[in-house]
Amino acid sequence: SSQFGSSRSHACSFGGSHTPCRHLLRPFPAPAMKTLVQEESLKVPKGVKITIKAKMVEVTGKHGTLKRDFKHLPIELYLAHSGHEVRAKMYFAKSKQLSMLRSVCSHISNLFDGVQKKFEYKMRLVYAHFPINATITNGGKTVEIRNFLGEKRVRTINMLEGVKVEKSTGTKDEIIITGTDIDCTSRSAALIRQSCLVKDKDIRKFLDGVYVSSHGTLED
């Protein structure tokens, strides 16, 4: 043995033989399994026209036209069965990357629902003492909220493109947000929600605000 220790330092401690320890014989972890090709399909509903060009999807229906860009995704997007089916294909992808195929189909499905039915978000004005006053201005494109927790400040929220807001006719202290684009409609509801946040108080006790009570598609 040398001055730096025994040459048998890596030998197995059982029996003193020169066989290497088990941790030295472990194989390297196997690389993640890649799928050769994966495909997802989606049927185009009746009364809807769709065009796909260089991963730019344009959907037209009775409520207008919506566009969505999927150029940032490494997928193949095309129409099949004479334009009656949308197909998304991906080659040599790992399991986590394959999840984007279903996501793309979900996005396109939301485009179909938007141009056919429109999306609707219902919001309730919740207060314990000071009644919140919501005023719709600018032809349904702007909401003005007053008297939140007794504050004098007027909160003005502009709706995003293609979104309209109105007061509910059947329910007190309720506003309804409608639009064809699910992103713009839900984000408009979020802007209203975030404009009425309670500051410097215990939010478990002070529950005032404007909250989404239900959401979905408008039934014809």
Image (spheres, rainbow, N blue to C red):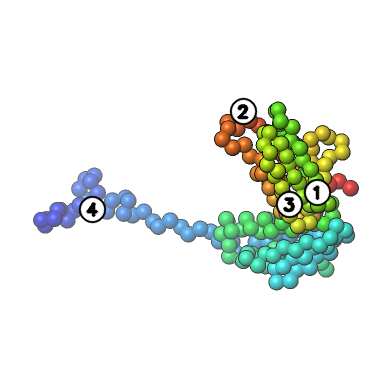
Mark 4 → mark 2, Cα distance in angstroms: 65 Å
Q: Quick check: marks 4 and 3 in contact, CB under 8 Å? A: no
Q: Would you identify the image quadrant in which residue 125 lies? A: top right
Nearest the viewer among 196 and 64 is: 196
Q: CA distance from mark 4 to mark 3?
A: 71 Å
Tell which residue pokes out farthest to the front in this image. Answer: 152
Point out which mark residue 70 bears. Answer: none
Q: Earlier in the sequence, mark 3 or mark 1?
A: 1
* Residue holding disc 4: 10
Return the x and y of residue 143 as percentages of the image width and height: 76, 46
Q: Which residue is mark 1?
A: 137
Image location (x, y in percent) of residue 94: 56, 59
Q: Please state which of residues 143 and 53 is positioned toward the viewer in this rendering.
A: 143
Residue bearing the label numbered 3: 158
**The N terminus sits in image quarter:** bottom left
Q: Horizontal and vertical percent for residue 144?
A: 75, 45
Q: Residue at x 72, y 33 (%)?
A: 126
**Is the residue 55 above or below the residue 44 in the image?**
below
Query: Could you say which is closer to the camera, residue 203 or residue 56?
Result: 203
Q: Earlier in the sequence, mark 4 or mark 1?
A: 4
Please indicate, yes or no, whether residue 79 appears anywhere in the rendered image.
Answer: no
Can you identify the residue that label 2 sits on?
Answer: 205
* Distance from Cα at disc 3 to Cα at disc 1: 10 Å
Please, what secondary structure does the residue beneath circle 2 have? loop
Mark toward the viewer: 3 or 2: 3
The residue type indicated by label 2 comes to: Lys
Decide which of tag 4 and tag 2 comes sooner along the chain.
4
Q: In terms of secondary structure, where does tag 1 sit?
A: strand
**At label 1, which amino acid type do we have?**
Thr
